[in-house]
Amino acid sequence: MTRARALAVNGRSQAAGGVRGLRPGAGTGPDRTDPAMDWGQLDLNPKVVAAVRKANIHSMKEILSLSGPDLQRLTKLSNRDVQYLHKTVAVAIKSDSVVTALQIYNGQCPFPTQNQRLSMGCPVLDLLLGGGIPLMGITEIVGESSAGKTQICMQLCLSVQFPCNYGGQESGAVYICTEDTFPNKRLQQLIAFQPMLRADVPADIVNNIKFANNIFIEHVADVESFNHCLSKRLPILLSRGLIRLVVVDSIAALFRCEFGATDSIAKAKCLQKFGAMLHHLSHRFSSPIICVNQVADAVSDSHWAQNQLGMSERRVLPALGLTWSNQLLMRLMVSRTHICIESKLPDGKVCSSNTGTVLRRMEIIFAPHLPQSFCNYIISKEGVRGMKGTEV
């Protein structure tokens, strides 16, 4: 039995060596939010050190949070000594260098993770998304049933395992299921056809990746379990480098039953809390977060007009409202069309028919780095493939 299959059956997140039974918070690394004073690494006059200790100041964060006059009043130091203390502490805890707008424009940004992308496993879709999914932030994939949301997510779970020079992160993924059983049979089919889908990758590299062993499956049924997963289980896997992708399928299912029409305030607070937790994990570990969302019918013409999704004419709106939308970096809308592609015809000829492969569409609704655009794609036994010449 494959690792992914075993996890899907048991409904637990585990791997070789196991994370089941791990102490919560183990291996999460040091907290850099409040670094302790290390006097041996600071070039300070002993009288300054003695004055700071006498003022009962124990951390660098305390020093930087105090203004010059306040620090001077507490330590009884001169203005010159306080300025030097501030400067020395700031240099000691500085983690990233300053980058100018000109450096970013010229592609000389010293923060490589801000420019990296997770490949969709298809060059056409990567072209639409400017290289793929950003490593930091929450990306939402929203659409009606059978639009291909889960198929895209599973393909991303495989793509993240490829080497970095082939659009991956050389790590695994966590797939959090909130309603349906994980489609393990389809996953095995996608794994078997990876050499055909990823023809750009040498066959020996593809064959050496144990795809099923690096996908951790977690079944979550309620908000409380989801909170426990985000706060306890995911940090362990991320800190150990076992995963670099988190998929939630779907985020809307968690709130559909637990919150009624009169619980809008509590629901909004819960969404903001989960959004903040997901953003923290994404930025701390440079790992993309993919959240699947559902759609609801627009109740009125005015409501639909105010929230119209880009170039789409479909009278549907994403679930969870504006509160959740504000947590997102990028929103992708996927949908089915009424057009089929006859695979037996040359050059993938498009025709209106009831047979063949259904043509689907992916549209960028909003993203800070991309314009609104779309392209068509199909779902075959190999996976999700974008259609050349349909990018707009």
Image: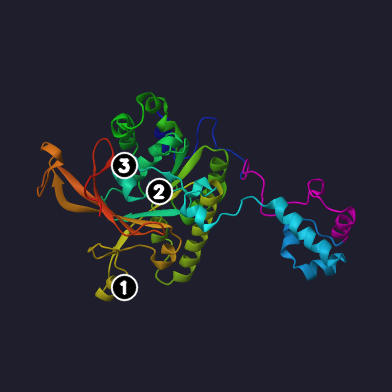
Residue depicted at 44% across the width and 70% down the height: 264
Up the image or down, 342 lies above or below 134; here it is: above
Residue on which disc 3 sits:
123
Up the image or down, 87 lies above or below 387; here it is: below
Quadrant of the rendered image containing residue 23: top right
Residue on which disc 1 sits:
306
Dot 2, crowdedness within 10 Å: few (<14), some or many (≥20)?
many
On screen, residue 253 versus residue 20, left or right, reads left
* Whole-percent x, y for residue 246 in the image: 45, 46
How is colour applied across the structure in the image?
rainbow
| In-front residue for pair 217/156 | 156
Identify the amino acid type marked 3.
Pro
Find the magenta span and give its range. 25-54
| In-front residue for pair 26/362 | 362
Q: Quadrant of the C terminus?
A: bottom left
Q: Decide whether residue 20 is among the magenta residues.
A: no
| In-front residue for pair 228/200 | 200
Identify the amino acid type marked 2.
Ile
